[in-house]
């Protein structure tokens, strides 16, 4: 497994590289944003570990540039800033997961394994009641999600989604009429096996709700107080 570490702090580079090499990974290093972007573009990696605070070009900009090029390589973002706003900013830029410094070796390794596992097996169990005859289109009520084009629509009107919103909607549409807890959503949408920050789930569900639950249409994304969220048709 080839990993790219984009990090400018020598002590962090040494720590991560040594630990991941011992764990069996082949780790390449870039010490600034521009060289990291170039390496990620020119060479093939199974996962990118990306620090936010980088000289020249910060990690948010690097992540956005990679996603703009349609690169789907999993990105684990590292930062010393752990507020909900900073986590959301990192995920909005296209990162798949977000790890706050300082972190334990075991947690870093678990996050990497989780991202690699999710990338290799992105599909969760399909709820057959939500699938049309065309197995590449999910449908709940008048909401449709095309898995080939990665596009969503309701009543034929296109819904613009970020990468994270798309993964969240796909998970909810594969599990219609079922209460999904915040931890379930974290584990299946972000592949996070730790209590990262469940407020991130609330933020993204609200983003998605505003796009799917339009004023003149029945609400599909519903809050189940004290339990989580559910995607279902209004009775």
Image: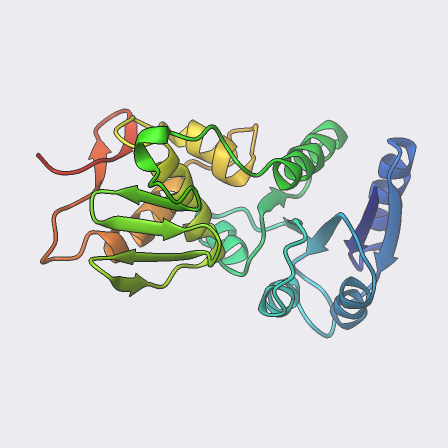
Residue in the picture at 56% in, 34% down: 192
Q: Position of residue 25 (x, y in %)?
A: 86, 39
Residue in the picture at 76% in, 31% down: 105
Question: Is the image coloured rainbow, by chain, by secondary structure, or in one colour?
Answer: rainbow
Residue in the picture at 43% in, 34% down: 185
Q: Position of residue 170 (x, y in %)?
A: 41, 43
Q: Is residue 73 above or below residue 20?
A: below
Q: Position of residue 110 (x, y in %)?
A: 69, 30
Q: Nearer the viewer, residue 221 or 85?
A: 221
Q: Is residue 227 left or right of residue 16?
A: left
Q: Quadrant of residue 56?
A: bottom right
Q: Is residue 212 left or right of residue 125?
A: left
Q: Nearer the viewer, residue 203 or 212?
A: 212
Q: Residue furthest front?
A: 133
Q: Quadrant of residue 205?
A: top left
- The quadrant in which the N terminus is found is top right
Q: Is residue 173 above or below residue 160?
A: above
Q: Nearer the viewer, residue 191 or 58?
A: 191
Q: Is residue 163 left or right of residue 202?
A: right
Q: Position of residue 20 (x, y in %)?
A: 85, 37
Residue in the picture at 82% in, 67% down: 42
């Amino acid at each position: 497994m080839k990993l790219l570490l984009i990090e400018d702090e020598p002590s962090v580079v040494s720590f991560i590289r040594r630990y991941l090499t011992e764990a069996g990974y082949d780790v390449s290093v870039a010490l600034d944003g521009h060289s990291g972007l170039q390496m990620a573009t020119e060479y093939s990696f199974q996962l990118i570990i990306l620090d936010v605070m980088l000289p020249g070009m910060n990690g948010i900009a690097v992540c956005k540039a990679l996603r703009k090029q349609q690169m789907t390589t999993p990105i684990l973002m590292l930062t010393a800033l752990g507020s909900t706003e900073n986590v959301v900013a990192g995920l909005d830029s296209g990162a798949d997961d977000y790890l706050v410094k300082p972190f334990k070796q075991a947690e870093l390794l678990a996050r990497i394994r989780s991202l690699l596992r999710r990338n290799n097996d992105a599909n969760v169990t399909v709820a057959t009641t939500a699938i049309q005859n065309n197995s590449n289109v999910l449908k709940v009520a008048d909401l449709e999600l095309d898995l080939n084009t990665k596009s969503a629509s309701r009543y034929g009107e296109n819904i613009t989604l970020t990468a994270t919103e798309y993964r969240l909607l796909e998970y909810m549409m594969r599990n219609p009429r079922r209460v999904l807890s915040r931890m379930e959503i974290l584990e299946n949408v972000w592949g996070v096996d730790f209590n990262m920050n469940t407020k991130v789930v609330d933020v993204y569900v609200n983003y998605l709700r505003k796009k799917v639950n339009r004023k003149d249409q029945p609400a599909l994304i519903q809050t189940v107080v004290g339990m989580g969220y559910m995607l279902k048709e209004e009775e």
